[in-house]
Image (spheres, rainbow, N blue to C red):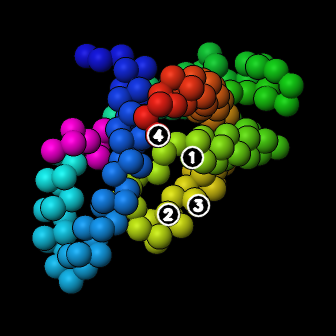
Amino acid sequence: FPSHDTLREKAFVAGKKMQTLQPELNALKEKFKDDKQAQQREMMAMMAQRGVKPMSGCLPIRPHLPIFFGLNAVLMHTFELRHAPFGLWLTDLTARDPLYITPVLMAVLMYIQQKLTPAPASMDPAQQKIMQFLPLIFAVFMLTYPSGLVLYIITNTVLSLLQQKYMMRKYANLD
């Protein structure tokens, strides 16, 4: 099973390759604007020919799903963790953040990460608008979740941002 770092790096490289294909993909969209099936078929053929896998951007999320659900279950059902002080305003990692600082911080970090991540070439403007609101949607969603879970996401996002900056330097020649 590949490590999380390898998955994130592969997703980053695939995103950079998708960016380089953007002009050609736009030309295909224009050429086949009346035939969506032919457009998709030609786009997929071009990506396969160039070795670009558009779904590889989803790979880094997969290892986190079991951790997310497992940590949530632990925080919700372990009595030993209840009211155990953590620090500053977080006096209970099993309860929601009383000041809503962690969900807001999470949204800001996710927004920054989103801006640093190469956008898929095939994304239309409507999808781009929806993607811009995802950090806010996640923040609202996480308002009621345990603050320990939000801290996990914040920590992971900070580490991902650092890794993203490193990969941007490492793969700067792919532009």
For the question of whether residue 149 can be seen, the reply is: no
Is-magenta flag for residue 132? Answer: no
Would you name the residue on which mark 4 appears? 175
Magenta span dominant secondary structure: helix
Q: Which amino acid is tagged 4? A: Asp
| Relative horizontal placement of residue 25, taking residue 15 as reference (left or right) | left
Would you name the residue on which mark 1 appears? 114
Query: How far from the left and from the top, in percent, is residue 13?
Result: 39, 33
Would you name the residue on which mark 3 appears? 133
Label 4 or label 2, whichever comes before in sequence order: 2
Label 1 or label 2, whichever comes before in sequence order: 1
> In front of the other: label 2 or label 3?
2
Q: Which amino acid is tagged 2? A: Gln
Query: How far from the left and from the top, in percent, is residue 156?
Result: 57, 27
Q: Which amino acid is tagged 1? A: Gln
The reply to whether callout 4 and callout 3 are in contact (CB within 8 Å) is no
Q: Which mark is residue 33?
A: none
**Magenta residues, start to end:** 49-56
The quarter of the picture where residue 17 lies is top left
Q: Which amino acid is tagged 3? A: Phe
Query: How far from the left and from the top, in percent, is residue 157?
Result: 59, 32
Image point (79%, 26%), residue name: 91
| Relative horizontal placement of residue 141, taking residue 106 as reference (left or right) | left
For the question of whether residue 54 can be seen, the reply is: yes
Q: Residue furthest bottom?
A: 34
Is-magenta flag for residue 55? Answer: yes
Label 4 or label 3, whichever comes before in sequence order: 3
| Relative horizontal placement of residue 4, taking residue 134 as reference (left or right) | left
Would you name the residue on which mark 2 appears? 128
